[in-house]
Every structure is written in C-alpha cells, then in structure tokens.
Amino acid sequence: MPPMNHWLVKSEPNTYSWEKLLKDKKTTWDGVRNYAARNNLRDMKKGDLVFFYHSNEGKEIVGIAKVAKEHFQDPTTDEAAWLAVELAPFKPLKKPVTLEQVKADKRLANIGLVRLGRLSVMKLEPNEFDVILELSEQ
C-alpha cells in the first residue's frame, strides 16, 4: 500500500468553517482557481488526512478531515482544468494550532503555510503533520 499523503486546506470561517463541515458530514472542496492548489487536489487520494485551517479570522488549524472522494470536475465551472475533491470530517484537534505557533516552531520552518501563504491547498511533509499534531496536544 502506498504511503498516505498529508495536506492542509484553508477556508475563511465565514465562508466555510470546520463547524459547518462537522454539521454537513462531508463537502465538495471546489472553487479553487490556482494551478498549484489544483495540482494538489489532483494528487489527493481517498483516505489521505487533511488539516483544516481557518484563514483570515482565527488563523489556526482546527481539525483533520479525510479525503472521501478523489478529484473530479469542479461543479462550479464548465472549465475542464479545474478540479474538486470531497472531504469528510475525521476529528477535531484537541487544541487549535495557531499560525504564530507554526511560525515559532523551527521544525516547521519550511512548511507551505508560512512559505506559500496564499496557497489554499498544500501538501505537508509527514514530519510537519506530526509536529502540528504534537502542538495540538500541548
């Protein structure tokens, strides 16, 4: 079995929040119009774990979702170039991990959340995923 990949998606809480995902039980992650983010959606596999980050308001990682359905044509556009995936909630973090905590941890110096601040869908290295989990337990 190939190793699982880890990801991070961003959403403004007033647009689509972690709480809404919990209530909805699943969602189509659509509307992405950045080629790098689209490529990350394309590479997501069913069962991959995805950190859910509240951007702008809160600026914190609040939960873990799972890829429930691999990429398909984004239903919000007729352009074939754009993709979506289906995400389902997996579990909330014990404690949210703030952007300040991420920036302060030297083990996360190269994380996309800091380096690629505007990217809405990004791949995480396994050790980055583990460090964030550890921070959420403190």
Image: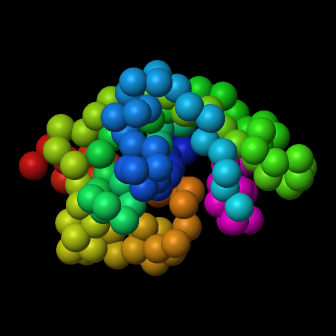
Scheme of image coloration: rainbow
Magenta span main SS: helix
- The magenta span reads 34-43
Report x, y in % for residue 91: 33, 29
User: As drawn, is 20 to the left or to the right of 70?
Assistant: left
Vertically, is 3 above or below 121? above
Q: Is residue 101 visible?
A: yes
106 and 36: which is toward the camera: 36
Residue located 33% across and 68% down the image: 108
Labels in figure, total? 0
Residue located 19% across and 53% down the image: 135
Residue 29: which quarter of the image?
top right
Report x, y in % for residue 109: 34, 75
Vertically, is 83 above or below 64? below
Is 96 one of the magenta-colored residues?
no
Report x, y in % for residue 121: 56, 56
Residue 84: which quarter of the image?
top right
Quadrant of the snapshot with the N terminus: top right
Q: Is residue 47 visible?
A: no
114 and 128: which is toward the camera: 114
Report x, y in % for residue 130: 32, 49
Vertically, is 125 above or below 65? below
Q: Residue furthest front?
A: 14
Residue located 42% across and 55% down the image: 12
User: As drawn, is 85 to the left or to the right of 65?
Assistant: right
